[in-house]
Image: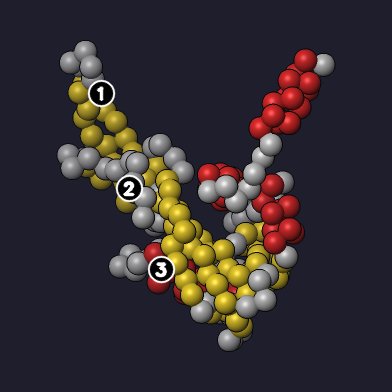
Amino acid sequence: MNKLKQSIPENAKKVFAGKLFDVYQWEQEMFDGSKQIFERVTKIDTAVVIAFTEDGKILVLNQEQPARGKYTSLPSGMIERGDEPMQTAERELLEETGYVAKELKLWHSHQLHDKVVWTYFYFIAKGCRKVSEQKLDVGGEKIEVMELEMSEFLDMLLVQKIKGSEIIMKMMNEDLIVIDKEKTLDKIKNYFNN
């Protein structure tokens, strides 16, 4: 797992405790010797599953929730206190899709924000097969499971129909998505010079 970039200092005091967020404040000495109050928020961490079926398709969800409306996502959920990220990945995959994985492994983790201590854990699930019906939050979730070809999945990522800029960057970093740098530079130069 990646080392967390942001954390809460030991001298911080919790000034707000919420259901999803807690707020901490502490006094911080500045370079000139003066002191200021700093603040950081913690949010419950999230497990995300990139799930491949036995025939190599990727499970993608069309969701609707009362507070969020309609959106497209990967199976995911908040890591409950006391749970490990992998437990959450397994649970959310089963609850949201009815599928279980033959193999599940951590692929990547990262924090999205500077002032919010919130880690996303990305898991790769291979050999997924349907074993039950969905077990959705009563009244709080409507989820349609789609099995997409890799090309459809990448198209959705690239146009941000599925929020996944971190997935794209990780794939590029591992040379899974290759961009011709020279062609890209030429296109950018032409675009901005016209």
Question: On the image, which quarter does residue 99 sit in?
Answer: bottom right
Kindly indicate whether the residue at mark 3 contacts the one at mark 2 (C-beta within 8 angstroms).
no
| Residue 156 in the image, given as x and y percentages of width and height | 71, 53
- The image quarter containing residue 53 is bottom right
The residue nearer to you, when weighing 92 against 11, is 92
Q: Say if mark 1 contacts mark 2, CB within 8 Å.
A: no
Q: Is residue 136 visible?
A: no
Identify the disc placed on residue 36: 1
Left or right for 30, reference 47: left
Labels in figure, total: 3
* Residue at x 77%, y 15% (from the top left corner): 193
Q: Which residue is mark 2?
A: 3
The residue depicted at 67 percent of the width and 40 percent of the height is 179
In the image, what residue type sits under mark 1? Gln
**Label 3 or label 1, whichever comes before in sequence order:** 1
Task: Identify the image quadrant of the N terminus.
Answer: bottom left
- Res. 86 mark: 3
Q: In the image, is residue 105 above or below residue 72?
A: below
User: Closer to us: mark 3 or mark 1?
Assistant: 3
